[in-house]
Image (cartoon, rainbow, N blue to C red):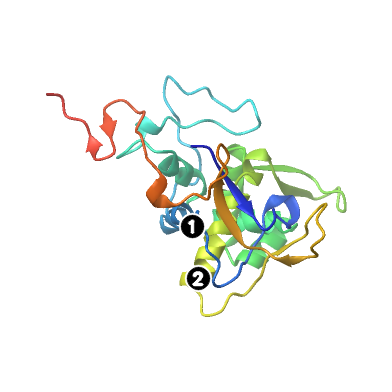
């Protein structure tokens, strides 16, 4: 099933990443996003994928990971966490999406130790999630910007933020607003939901059937040879 994040609106942030959300928001995709946030000890950079590794993404991403080389179940979530599962990685991506492109801004707004942050930013650039280039306002000082792969993390970050609003924090510290285009309604608070791109129905976990395509695995685990 092809799933897309529907909403009372799309994103309203810069570079495609927003923050915050209503405390009672029903983040239909929060389960996956919450899992991504829960495994915060991912590797600092991409892991080589072996002989089948294409070495890069034609659409601007970094080196690809062969999921069968990782411990446990071959899974794109586990592979993604190798790149962005570290505590500081998603916070750095959040700040770049807010329009804070300079290292000093990212360090100040994440609270990350500068040596750790420098390593994470370097890894995110190597992975094709961020790019480093001169800033229009400060040409002498290169800044960090989201690539298409980085912008594609926007929905996951928004769902994780809404999950945090609902289940973790005492009071949501930020809020998302939607600016509709070609719609009579004015600006309004953003509430998202996940809908199937094929049929338009809202997606619930109970309606999803998962199929393992990696050889030697099914949903219960490794398949034993009879």
Q: In which quarter of the image is the C terminus?
A: top left
User: Residue at the spot x=26%, y=27% of the render?
Assistant: 216
Query: Exactly how many numbered labels are in the figure?
Result: 2
Q: Position of residue 28 (x, y in %)?
A: 50, 56
Mark 2 crowdedness (10 Å alpha carbons): few <14, some 14-19, many ≥20: some
User: Residue at the spot x=58%, y=75% of the render?
Assistant: 172
**Would residue 8 be visible to someone looking at this image?**
yes
Image quarter of residue 99: bottom right
Q: Position of residue 11 (x, y in %)?
A: 70, 54
First along the sequence among labels 1 and 2: 1
Image quarter of residue 105: bottom right
Query: Is residue 98 toward the left or the right of residue 204 in the image?
Result: right
Query: Is residue 69 toward the left or the right of residue 118 in the image?
Result: left
Label at residue 11: none
Image quarter of residue 134: top right
Choose between 49 and 134: the one closer to the eye.
Answer: 49
Task: Tell which residue pokes out farthest to the left in this image.
Answer: 226
Choose between 84 and 200: the one closer to the eye.
Answer: 200
**Which residue is labeled 1 in the image?**
30
**Which residue is labeled 2 in the image?**
166
Which element is circle 1 on?
helix
Q: How far apart are marks 1 and 2 (CA)?
A: 10 Å
Q: Where is residue 151 in the image (x, y as percent from the top left)?
A: 66, 45
User: Residue at the spot x=44%, y=20% of the render?
Assistant: 52
**Would residue 115 be visible to someone looking at this image?**
no
Task: Tell which residue pokes out farthest to the top in this image.
Answer: 51
Q: Do the residues labelled 1 and 2 touch (CB within 8 Å)?
A: yes
User: Residue at the spot x=55%, y=67% of the render?
Assistant: 25
Q: Position of residue 55 (x, y in %)?
A: 54, 25
Mark 1 crowdedness (10 Å alpha carbons): few <14, some 14-19, many ≥20: many
Query: Is residue 72 toward the left or the right of residue 178 in the image?
Result: left
Which element is circle 2 on?
helix
């Amino acid at each position: 099933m092809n799933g897309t994040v529907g909403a009372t609106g799309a994103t309203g942030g810069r570079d495609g990443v927003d923050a915050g959300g209503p405390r009672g928001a029903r983040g239909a995709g929060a389960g996956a996003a919450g899992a991504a946030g829960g495994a915060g000890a991912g590797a600092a950079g991409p892991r080589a994928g072996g002989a089948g590794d294409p070495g890069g993404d034609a659409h601007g991403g970094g080196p690809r990971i062969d999921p069968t080389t990782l411990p446990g179940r071959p899974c794109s979530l586990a592979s993604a966490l190798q790149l962005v599962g570290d505590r500081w990685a998603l916070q750095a991506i959040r700040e770049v999406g807010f329009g804070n492109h300079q290292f000093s801004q990212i360090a100040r707004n994440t609270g990350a130790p500068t040596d750790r942050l420098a390593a994470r930013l370097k890894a995110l650039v190597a992975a094709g999630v961020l790019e480093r280039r001169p800033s229009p306002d400060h040409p002498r000082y290169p800044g960090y910007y989201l690539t298409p792969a980085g912008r594609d993390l926007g929905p996951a970050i928004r769902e994780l933020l809404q999950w945090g609003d609902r289940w973790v924090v005492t009071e949501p510290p930020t809020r998302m607003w939607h600016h509709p285009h070609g719609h009579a309604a004015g600006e309004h608070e953003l509430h998202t939901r996940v809908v199937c791109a094929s049929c338009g129905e809202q997606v619930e976990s109970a309606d999803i059937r998962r199929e393992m395509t990696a050889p030697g695995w099914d949903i219960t685990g490794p398949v034993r040879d009879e």
